[in-house]
Image: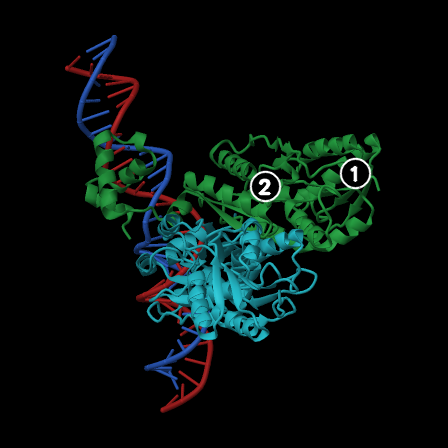
Chain colours: A cyan, B green, C blue, D red
Amino acid sequence: MASLDDVAREAGVSASTVSRALSRPTMVAEPTLLRVRAAADRLGFRANPAARALTTGRSGFFAMLVPDLDNPFYSTTATAAQDLAGATGRRVIIAVTGGDPAREAAALHEMESQVDGFAVQSPVSSAAELKRAHERKPVVAINRRVPGLTSFTVDTPGGLGEVYDRLVELGHRDVAYLAGPPSSWMDRHRRAELVEHAARSGLRVRVHGPVRPAFAEGVAAARGILDSGCTAVLVYNSLLLLGVMFEFGRLGVRVPEDLSVAAADDIALADLPGPPITAVRTPADELGRAAVTALSAMVDGDPDDRPRGRRLPTTVRITDSLAPPRTA
Amino acid sequence: MASLDDVAREAGVSASTVSRALSRPTMVAEPTLLRVRAAADRLGFRANPAARALTTGRSGFFAMLVPDLDNPFYSTTATAAQDLAGATGRRVIIAVTGGDPAREAAALHEMESQVDGFAVQSPVSSAAELKRAHERKPVVAINRRVPGLTSFTVDTPGGLGEVYDRLVELGHRDVAYLAGPPSSWMDRHRRAELVEHAARSGLRVRVHGPVRPAFAEGVAAARGILDSGCTAVLVYNSLLLLGVMFEFGRLGVRVPEDLSVAAADDIALADLPGPPITAVRTPADELGRAAVTALSAMVDGDPDDRPRGRRLPTTVRITDSLAPPRTA
DNA sequence: AGCGCTTCTGCAAGCGCTTGCAACACCGTA
DNA sequence: TACGGTGTTGCAAGCGCTTGCAGAAGCGCT
């Protein structure tokens, strides 16, 4: 493996010049620059990341903590984050926490010396814990607003509001909500919104669950939803919805004739053929990119003015999966 | 952040002694050891990974290359690998390649200086390319046998054989196989086996696809399978099967009365409620752990005697999703 | 011609750790 | 008593890179 010195010798300059040529090209005269680059290419030189990390104190790694990888929302976010980071020569390490506060905290602690910052998906640790981590390495929160931390969320409640409105307009009175895991800040948030909206509009809402956001759980919950006598159902996420629809199919429940359905995200629905389902479009990939951008800014810039978080807007796709309630 | 020197001062010994006490405790006298440990604890010392990597030439990272994360087979393998690696103080970096040979090769190349080894899931690069990478950093292949490389595969063909036998026994003559992506070594392997078995047993096999192994693709393929007039269908993986079943439900196709079904893995089926589906149980987590174990051995031991790969056995769960063909 | 200035380059220190080697004390043995 | 061995520790070099500082050119200007 060629080192800086090898390149220096090859190009007839000093190691410092090579270093500058490669990482701060403007500091080097044109002809030298070209000579160095040529030499580096010839030798197939690649900077040793450990050595660089040692001197600069930056590893070029970000860590993204995710509850699990089976949830397409997380994997989409993680993949987008990786892609964007890759473009600036950084890498995103994905660490699975299982949605367990202890594991999340452990990951935060163990990796603090190996990464330049953390993006934590749907954090379950206490705000204090997260802030403590932030004092050592920048932390941004995804999918939960944490006071004092740059946070990126999605305005799903706003999008769901539109769906409720539409349901009321269609004449629905009894709606089911299949809730996500209790640890989910997002779910709590949505439920609060839902209750409030219900009070305002006279909708009757029955909450089912909570359940793990997995296909199988949706399948299992379908029957209960049906039996509850509602005329429409909102589901925590698209993975669950798929499960619910799966069982509806087997039970012979027609959508929307028998029941109206909508999901709070559209990730797993994205390329589902057949009639589309009403869903709140959540820009999971943007979320991942926003987190990486924010982390990069914190690492490069003044660590004290942290970038502002954002709540990303959603768009609602209202389709024929919503129809007037069956007048039984 | 406390450094080795800080600990040395605190404990009243030299830095080398601290280093040895922490990484080779047997080389240090008992009382010194205790003193050093106490000092390290007091200061909350954690070795700087970059510095360690610089001197030892080992980063403590393995990379696992996966085609995508939405496939539960890959995420299961990756998670299991991470967990096992974590137990020995290593970390597994997951890199998504999209099943694209160019991206896979690029990842292999770009990360070669940051990791101690690669575990490549279902590699799509040429054997030559993989071997070249292996010359620089140990590479193990998962889910494909690559000559010259330690490879871990699963004996799905063997398991499927049992399923075929059972189908023949039940009197089926026309079977559909919904094939996975053309880049999949595993799929090619299975197909070869299938063809051979068909020749031997007089089964008529029609191959559908190839398709991407995703839920939506399963949904889309269901109709065609149905129309092909087969009496049983085997599906490349469980994610696809879920999609097929989803559509069957909507179309009113009953399993197994109208059609027998089986999947070549059981990952996404694992906790699906309702009547079980015939599936070949693939130990995805063991695959991940085996890869990490092999890589660790290669890094620690003599680099020339590489650990032997294995083909992990499968177990077949034959259920009532298989029944005699409907005598139309 | 001499000045200050900007540009470019090299020197050398140092990031925090590991490790070969040498120093030392202490042991049993001849 | 002297010697080789063993066990424990410190010294110092060095891993490959970055960067502050200073020296060397080259410039336009008076």
Q: Quadrant of residue A297?
A: bottom left
Where is residue B117 shown, x and y percent of the image? Answer: 52, 42
Please state which of residues B255 and B283 is positioned toward the viewer in this rendering. B255
Relative height, residue C29 to residue A19 (above, below): above
Q: Which residue is mark 2?
A: B134
Please state which of residues A199 and B145 is positioned toward the viewer in this rendering. A199
Question: Chain letter of disc 1?
Answer: B
Q: Which residue does the image show at 46% across and 52% down from the upper left?
A: A67
The amino acid on which the numbered mark 2 sits, given as a three-letter code, is: His
Question: Chain letter of disc 2?
Answer: B
Q: Which residue is mark 1?
A: B325
Is residue B100 visible in this depiction of the protein?
no
Q: Quadrant of the C terminus of chain A?
A: bottom right
| Front disc: 1 or 2 | 1
Relative height, residue D15 to residue A198 (above, below): above
The amino acid on which the numbered mark 1 sits, given as a three-letter code, is: Pro
Where is residue B178 shown, x and y percent of the image? Answer: 74, 46
Q: Which residue does the image show at 51% across and 60% down from the upper left?
A: A236
